[in-house]
Image (cartoon, rainbow, N blue to C red):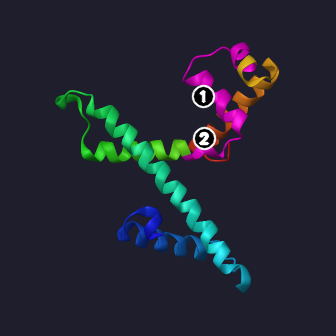
């Protein structure tokens, strides 16, 4: 992992996180598959780390454009980055067409018809995709009780 991440500290943190994740699952893989299982868990954590760094860099770049007086405090920055990572995680758990439809509607302001053309699906499918995406977001914010 040290070679993949570029430094020993990140590799040690990731090894620890891998151990915690494996212990938290409560499952023990067969001995002949344990290395593959650990590698699979570690690769997932590396992807999460890279995704978080990409989000953090984009956020920091965006706030660097703000005047000094308008820049958020360190605490606000940390909270914003954490929220962005949670949103990114939620979006990546959605099926690809649901995620794409939701982002095209909410971020790009596209019409259902235009989204349908872009995705190659009917307007009815777009409506279902967006409803599913919004439901997932609502459940993430308010819990599954809704």
Left or right: 25 with respect to 30?
Answer: left
How would you rate the neighbour count of disc 2 (Cα within 10 Å): few for under 14, some for 14-19, many for 20 or more? some
Q: Residue, x 56% and y 67% (percent of image)?
A: 42
Membership of 132 in magenta stretch: no
Q: Which mark is residue 142?
A: none
Location of mark 2 (residue): 91
> Percent x, y for residue 7?
36, 66
Q: Residue, x 67% and y 42% (percent of image)?
A: 94
Left or right: 140 with respect to 125?
Answer: left
Residue located farthest toward the bottom when viewing the structure as drawn: 31
Q: Magenta region's main secondary structure?
A: helix
Chain-order first, disc 2 or disc 1: 2
Membership of 111 in magenta stretch: yes
Give the SS element for disc 1.
helix
> Percent x, y for residue 43?
57, 63
To which quarter of the image does residue 22 belong? bottom right
Q: Residue, x 69% and y 77% (percent of image)?
A: 27
To which quarter of the image does residue 109 belong? top right
**Discs 2, 1 touching: Cβ within 8 Å:** yes
Q: Taking 134 as reference, is 12 above or below it?
A: below
> Percent x, y for residue 50?
47, 52
Residue located farthest toward the left when viewing the structure as drawn: 69
Magenta segment range? 89-116
How would you rate the neighbour count of disc 1 (Cα within 10 Å): few for under 14, some for 14-19, many for 20 or more? some
Left or right: 18 with respect to 5?
Answer: right
Q: Quadrant of the C terminus?
A: top right
> Percent x, y for residue 120?
78, 23
Location of mark 1 (residue): 103
Q: Taking 96 as reference, is 20 above or below it?
A: below
Q: Taking 103 as reference, is 29 above or below it?
A: below
């Amino acid at each position: 992992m040290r070679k993949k991440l570029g430094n020993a500290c990140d590799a040690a943190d990731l090894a620890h996180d891998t151990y915690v994740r494996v212990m938290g699952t409560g499952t023990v893989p067969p001995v002949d598959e344990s290395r593959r299982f650990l590698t699979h868990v570690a690769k997932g954590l590396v992807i999460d780390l890279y995704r978080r760094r990409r989000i953090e860099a984009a956020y920091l770049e965006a706030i660097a454009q703000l005047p000094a007086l308008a820049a958020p405090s360190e605490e606000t920055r940390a909270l914003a980055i954490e929220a962005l990572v949670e949103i990114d995680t939620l979006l990546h758990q959605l099926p690809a067409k649901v995620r794409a439809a939701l982002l095209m509607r909410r971020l790009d302001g596209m019409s259902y018809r235009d989204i349908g053309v872009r995705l190659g699906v009917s307007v009815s499918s777009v409506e279902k995709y967006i409803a599913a995406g919004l439901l997932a977001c609502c459940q993430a914010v308010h819990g599954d009780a809704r």
